[in-house]
């Protein structure tokens, strides 16, 4: 592919990523993903102020049709994960369901007619 992204230490440094973090992203967080797809996820996380090591998004291969040629090609797209929704809920202050349950008083019933 002629426009394939080449990852260098300087291109990582421009995004504030060190080689150890890049290695973790490529080998553990997004194994098997193309370099440009991982960079796309990094840019998405940076734009939304998210930690990419918490994997708030997933890279999902999808068939996308080219509007000019009509041909379909496979490419990775960024899909939000449940972690992203939890982060958003926590940041909003409306994250429900994380506290211990509160129970009312015990009730004793006698069932008849069974």
Image: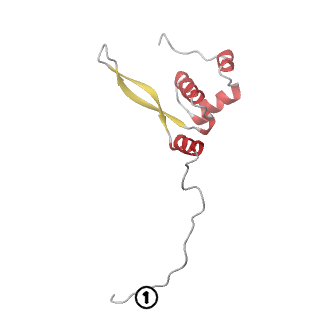
Measured as percent of width and height from the top left, residue 96 is found at 54, 53
Quadrant the C terminus occupies: bottom left
**Residue in front for this viewpoint, 51 or 103:** 103
Residue drawn at x 56%, y 33% is 30
Location of residue 21 with respect to 104 vertically, above or below:
above
**Residue in front for this viewpoint, 10 or 110:** 110
Q: How many marks?
A: 1
Measured as percent of width and height from the top left, residue 3 is found at 49, 11
Measured as percent of width and height from the top left, residue 49 is found at 61, 31
**Residue in front for this viewpoint, 74 or 55:** 55
Residue marked by disc 1: 110
Q: Residues within 10 Å of mark 1 (few under 14, many from 20)?
A: few
> Image quadrant of residue 87?
top right
> Image quadrant of residue 55?
top right
Measured as percent of width and height from the top left, residue 65 is found at 33, 22
Q: Is residue 54 left or right of residue 77?
A: right
Q: Secondary structure at mark 1?
A: loop
């Amino acid at each position: 592919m002629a426009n394939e992204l080449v990852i260098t230490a300087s291109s990582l440094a421009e995004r504030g990523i060190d080689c150890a973090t890049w290695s973790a992203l490529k080998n553990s967080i997004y194994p098997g993903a193309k370099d440009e797809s991982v960079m796309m996820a990094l840019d998405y996380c940076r734009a939304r102020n998210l930690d990419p090591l918490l994997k708030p998004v997933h890279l999902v291969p999808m068939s996308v049709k080219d509007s000019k040629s009509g041909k379909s090609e496979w490419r990775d797209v960024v899909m939000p994960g449940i972690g992203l929704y939890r982060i958003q809920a926590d940041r909003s202050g409306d994250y429900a369901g994380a506290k211990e349950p509160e129970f009312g008083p015990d009730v004793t019933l006698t069932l008849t007619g069974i």
